[in-house]
Amino acid sequence: MSTPAPAPLRLAVVGCGVIGRLHAEVAAHSPDLEVVALVDPYEPGAAAVAAQLTGLGQPEPRIFADLAAALDGGGIDVVAVCTLSGTHASLALEALEAGAHVVVEKPLDVAMGPARRLREAAAERPGQVVAVISQHRHDPASLAVHNALKAGRFGTVTSAVANIDWFRTQAYYDSADWRGTWALDGGGALMNQGVHTLDLLLWFLGEPVEVTAHTARVGHERIEVEDVAVAILRFANGALATLHATTTAYPDLGVRLQVHGTDGSAVIAADELTFFHARDAEGTEWENDQVARELREAAVQGPQGDYANPHLTQWTDIAAAVREGRDPWVTLEDGLRALATVRAVYLSATLGRPIRVADVLDGAYDEQATHTGFTAPLGK
Ligand SMILES: NC(=O)c1ccc[n+]([C@@H]2O[C@H](COP(=O)([O-])OP(=O)(O)OC[C@H]3O[C@@H](n4cnc5c(N)ncnc54)[C@H](O)[C@@H]3O)[C@@H](O)[C@H]2O)c1
């Protein structure tokens, strides 16, 4: 007799905007999930997502104006926090304290204080999964590079170059009050757009030690945050990296991430592996034509079928982590480290000196919560 499939996890999607809609759609395509609640103070937003779900043949979810009301009703296994970035950690904490597993969209939050409080609460509840979305860790190209690094195929890792050369129109920033604010977006090109690539950089190179950075707002109006950030990062293994994140690179050149070592290098551009050269344990050099094998070995299998995207792959891992009582692929600690590194960039730009990431993680700058300025113009 075959074992019956486990019941789907009952999911509440909190925040029914651009990304909440995607989480609901992903859940509708996943055997692991069923959306039972939608939470948004803007009722038409939640109603539109409910209609999307029923249109996909899903049961009609209940709609709530706030998370407390949804949690009061019970019957929720996992909460997906898809709201404005500055509300992430406090909503995640509320869900965690109510006994739910939690999935937080990137970035984990915009300030270290709430993020650190979430970490403390999670440590007291080891049975509950807390995951942070970083869907590009599931791209086959990212997995291939990570696996090659782990196996030592690039030799001594020396350096990396991360370029996030995006373009966002003024209309994008004008489209919602929270965009481009310190309190709710928490930063600009780096906190909102660049954090995906920064997370990959940390995943590849390990513990970031120190950050030196400058930031500027040069291509947009009516935003408080930077639209250009440049930084130098020093890692515990001795490697150095440069980071350039902008939303002013017209017409949008996308993302490029290079990793270099004494035995090999890799380049990921637009989520694809465009260069790969490495050495295996026997000393044989691997060129691009052998990468397909590496990719096959590396790829974490998400559900097969017409509907596939990295969010679905990450959710598949998260559901398995809940069922198996293990850590998810991208942990709260990973999200915290990425956030601390972004904060180190802003602190360095504001204070005009290198910032140690461990100090940010330890709360040394918690009082400088969200409001940081730009690098002072020379001579001022
Ligand atoms: N992983 C990715 O690729 C990706 C892509 C886009 C956005 N995001 C992240 O998702 C988050 C939301 O971005 P978006 O573009 O969907 O924003 P959005 O403005 O489109 O949607 C946010 C929604 O949250 C609702 N909301 C606000 N406060 C709430 C609360 N307390 N409870 C419930 N709902 C609340 C708003 O009414 C709105 O409908 C951001 O943190 C962003 O960084 C991630």
Image (tube, grey):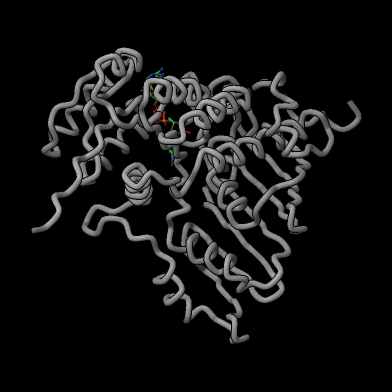
Residue 299 in the image: state x and y as whole percent: 40, 64
Q: Residue furthest right?
A: 379
Residue 66 vs residue 10, the one in the foreground = 10
| Quadrant hosting residue 13 | top left
**Rendered image quadrant of residue 261:** bottom right
Q: Quadrant of ligand 1?
A: top left
Q: Is residue 338 left or right of residue 103?
A: right
Residue 3, compared with residue 183, is above or below; it is: below
| Viewer-closest of 166 and 37 | 37
Q: Is residue 271 left or right of residue 111?
A: left
Q: Quadrant of the C terminus?
A: top right
Q: Could you tell me residue 171's position as x and y percent?
A: 47, 29
Residue plotted at (24% across, 40% down): 33
User: With 45 as the anchor, is 286 left or right in this view?
Assistant: right
156 to 23, vertically: above or below: below
Q: Position of residue 69 (x, y in %)?
A: 30, 12
Q: 133 and 345: which one is in front?
A: 133
Residue 90, x across and y down, in percent: 49, 20
Q: Is residue 8 left or right of residue 324?
A: left
Quadrant, the N terminus? bottom left
Q: Residue at x 54, y 81 (%)?
A: 287
Count the labels in the image. Answer: 0
Residue 194 picture quarter: top right
Q: Is residue 231 depicted above or below 77 in this figure? A: below
Residue at image point 45% right, 49% down: 329
Q: Residue furthest left?
A: 1
Residue at (47% x, 58% y) in the render: 271
Q: Is residue 43 above or below residue 207?
A: above
